Amino acid sequence: MKRALLNLSSLLVFLFFIIFLSPSFAQNNTTASNVLTVAIAGTQQLKLTSKIILGQEYSVQVNLPGHYSDTSKKFPVIYLLDSQWDFPLVSGIYGGQYYDGFMPEAIIVGITWGGENPNYGQLRARDFTPTNLGQGAQFGNAANFLTFIQQELTPFIEANYRVSKNNRTLMGSSLGGLFTLYALFKAPDFFQNYVLTSPATPWDQDVIYKIEQEYWDKNKTLPVRLYMATGDAEDVAIFNKWVNTVKGRKYTGLNLQTKVLENIGHSGTKPIGYTQGLQWVFKKTPVSLTATQLKPYVGTYLLDKEVLKIVIENNALVGIDAQNHKTVLAAETEKDFFVPGRFLFLHFQKDQANQVAGFQLEQFEGVTFAKKKE
């Protein structure tokens, strides 16, 4: 009997450890005091009440770059529509694209609606559409919303953050993509870059075509970078109709890229489309340098204790490390070079005798200097 009780006691102790200390039990008994809100590092949330749109409160989310503390720098600014859904997404995309060297440090400004329990569906339909379909204030507020961005939001951002006033990007999808196109043709000089996916071009019997036509009648130039994408699970014919219209204009100064994304539906265009769109609008175009311009950089360099060589191959500078790995260097200027798809930048420097002294090597981990051997 005593042995049986001991066995029962051991079994109960065993069950205690299995049941009460198991991860599933601990998870089911987590108290609210242990639940913490996850915040995106380096971000802020502000409120702006518009005087243009009947006292509408907007929630503005700001993501600051890692080197924002450097007061000598100003940064490109990306204005993102529908940030109630896409601010975390675009913040993550930006981090990856910056790390890979596809884009510079930038400030992201997310725009959404504030107030108590905002109805995002109704509010975005109101602010993103250019016509009201005869249904009053429920639709057709795009003109006022664009004015809000131009006259209230942007001046506030530029007064309180160190942003470049001539490097603004607007991003939107679906109805947000429709509004992005509306802004493109109504205020083409305000933003320099436009990224949009799955634009709702059929809105109100293709009214965006009329808006584009009105612009075309007065302007044959459109000096912006524009990226547009849709998913192949959407109605690609609708997208291609719009793309062919824009391409057919042959606007002077327009840098256009369009994509049909494989195995992607309407909402899924944003992760891939926004990634490729940011790459496109911030893409560096290599300059072509002559052999005479490149020759002064040829030689052997000492980086800490590592020996690096710079040679010319196929009319381009090529870096060769101690393991004989080759890296082609694209020219950004006559003295600044980069490697596409990598956070790697070389800035050649000259001495007082106007001879190449070495280069500053900028990587994600920091900046070092490679001295040229005499």
Image: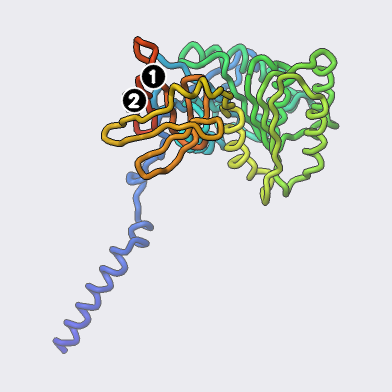
Q: Nearer the viewer, residue 183 or 18?
A: 183
The residue depicted at 42 percent of the width and 43 percent of the height is 325
Q: Position of residue 183 (x, y in %)?
A: 70, 21
Q: Which residue is mark 2?
A: 372
How many marks on residues? 2
Q: Residue at x 37, y 62 (%)?
A: 24
Residue 294: % across, % down: 49, 24
Inspect this view and state whether residue 307 appears. Answer: yes
**Residue 32 vs residue 131: left or right?**
left
* Amino acid under disc 2: Lys
Residue 356, disc: 1
Quarter of the figure with the N terminus? bottom left
Labelled pair 2, 1 in contact (Cβ < 8 Å): yes
Q: How is the image coloured?
A: rainbow
Asked if residue 94 can be seen in this view, the reply is: no
Q: Secondary structure at mark 2?
A: strand
Residue 334, percent from left and from top = 50, 19
What's the distance in space between the residues labelled 2 and 1, CA to CA?
7 Å
| Label 1: element kind | strand
Tell me the kind of residue under disc 1.
Val
- Residue 99 vertical placement versus 185 (above, below): below
Q: Nearer the viewer, residue 103 or 327?
A: 327
Image quadrant for the C terminus? top left
Q: Return the x and y of residue 147 as percentages of the image width and height.
A: 66, 15
- Would you identify the image quadrant in which residue 213 lies? top right
Nearer to the camera, 351 or 64? 351
Nearer-the-camera pick, 141 or 116? 141
Corner quadrant of residue 244: top right
Which residue is most to the bottom?
1
Dot 2 or dot 1, earlier in sequence: 1
